[in-house]
Amino acid sequence: LGVFTVPANYSMVAAKGQSKNIMMNDLPVTTKAESLQMIKLNGKVYMRVGVSLANSGTKVLSDPGYKAYLTSAGGTVFELRLDDASSSYKVQPQEKKTIYYMGEIPSYIKTVNMTLQFAQEDSTLKIDLPVQSFILPAATTAKLAVANYDVKKISIDNNTVETQIKSASVYSENESAKWSIQFRIKNVGNKSVTLPAYELAIKATEGFIIPVDTKALTKLTLKPFEEKIIDLSADVRLNLNQSTLQLQLTEPAVADKIIVPTAYYQIPYSQEKNSFIGLESIMENSYGTFGVKLDSIQRLPWADEDQIVAKISIRNTKLTTVKLPALKALVKAGLNDLSSTTQIVAKNAQTSLAPNETAEMYVIAKVPYSYSISQLRVVLQETSGDDVTNFLSLNTTMLNNAMNTVVSGGSFHIDMTGKKAEIRERRTTIYSGSSSNVMYTELEMKNEEPRQSKQAQLVAYYKTPDNQYYEAKVSQSSDATSPNGKNLVTVWSKLPQSVNTSQLVLYIGQGVADGKLTALGGTSTGYINTVGLSLNTVAVTPSSNLNNVDMFPYSLSVVNAVGKISEGKDALNTVITYNLSKNGDYEAGAYEHKLVLEIIDPYGQTMEK
């Protein structure tokens, strides 16, 4: 029929580094073999081929279903498959994207002058027809290992994503090494990117693989230049070498696809630091960078057990305002988990922090009073459904009871927003009984808020020098107090007669319940900001008469008492007339006090009213 002359320099094979225009799905596409990587893993050799596709058409290019083959210089052919990240790829008009093929080869095959071949099945002839071949660049060995704190750049949908182990720390508990790792991910590309469902595991040199929870990576989308810090945790057996562990990042396993790790990050070995009272340390998480300080730790009595109160300050070190999440607390005293008894009380109801602004909060947990504690761990966590993310973690062995003391006659202040007040002792006395004594203290409470305010509900204990604690009953008015107004708080407790009351100290703090200060008249489940108030005990001196009897803030005067007896009756009808006046300097409401008048006849018989 005729003859076609093929040019002498014609070749179906594109030279090394040369691009070829190919019609894919009726779209003109500029294609180029970009890279050839060799990955050695578990005694096997995998080849990874990168091919760029530049869509010059007006429609989206999807995978045309080409078959790909890797051919050695000696003619041996190996089938390639798209890796998981490149499967079902799509290239927008005028977009350029690099896709990757994977294949396994024997370790003895030479990788010099390898060729990539594309073929497409002819549906009529039922055979594979050649599309295009490319001479590949020289093979390079893929560097999967990432040194301590180094940045590993990963390409996802032609976007560059930085990954890095930001920090790591470990502590031992029983037979496990408890690891906490911060993994940083930043999109440095110019478009949003959704991460593949990466799987993470810790790889030990002894060959063990320990899975790591990766819920935080599920469907994670990063905007251009957006950065996330992911908190990871894992338990590793103590008998494994902890200084050579690696964090393995792998795409999820898919049937009929070769999956190799994307990177191995060397985990820096660093033992968990001990937090010192009053010393700020810088911590970074996905919300920002914070200066965190453990202000104090108090261990105090609570009914038949003890409560531990850790006061924590969180300062925003960034130049932008950050939003704080809703937090819950995990508390461990040694190996004893106290989390079921914990509550967090915020000093101010802050949901965000301006630059250099500080939030203060109290973490409260209950512990048996006989339990000896040498180490305390406090972890603040954000929970969303079943997902738990650590916000910060503190560990300390500095468990000296931080107790502010107030000298006799001195005062202390409540500094909680809405409840600010000054408290001082007015008087303390002892009422002796036949089997026990009553310790009684009156406190003057001055409102330091600029407007009318209800008092903080107080909780109190009397403490002896040998660390015995006697729970006290506190009586307060439920009425609001005016600015600079004064109110009276009465505290009392029954004590055995053997207690030396001259050396008692009143431990007093603000009651809390359900994560906030207790409402007046409510039931407290703990208390915070406790101080030790030294008392000035004075003896009770009964009045010689019933004129101007001091019952602060009241004064009682009996005007007269008239007794009448009716003929033929054995009852004495007694009428007592008295004046009861109140000190107007105090906004005293109702208290749990009773006024008892007792009449004693010459024969010692008594009557009370």
Image: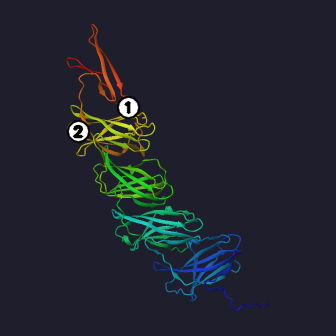
Please indicate whether residue 104 sits to the left or right of residue 497 in the image: right
In the displayed structure, 25 sits above or below 577; it is below
Outermost residue on the top side: it is: 567
Horizontal and vertical percent for residue 155? 55, 72
Please indicate whether residue 99 sits to the left or right of residue 600 in the image: right
- The quadrant holding residue 194 is bottom right
Q: Nearer the viewer, residue 461 or 409?
A: 409
Q: Dot 1: few (<14), some (14–19), or many (≥20) neighbours within 10 Å?
A: some
Say if mark 1 contacts mark 2, CB within 8 Å. Answer: no
In the displayed structure, 162 sits above or below 525; it is below
Horizontal and vertical percent for residue 142? 50, 78
Q: Nearer the viewer, residue 321 or 179?
A: 321
Please indicate whether residue 606 sits to the left or right of residue 95 in the image: left
Q: Amino acid at mark 1?
A: Tyr
User: How many numbered dots are placed on residues in this image?
Assistant: 2
In the displayed structure, 132 sits above or below 390; it is below
The residue drawn where x is 57% and y is 63% is 223
Q: Which residue is mark 2?
A: 501
- The quadrant holding residue 572 is top left
In the rendered image, the quadrant that contains the C terminus is top left
Q: Which residue is mark 1?
A: 586
Residue 570 visible: yes
| The label number, if any, that marks residue 342 in the structure image | none
Q: Amino acid at mark 2?
A: Thr
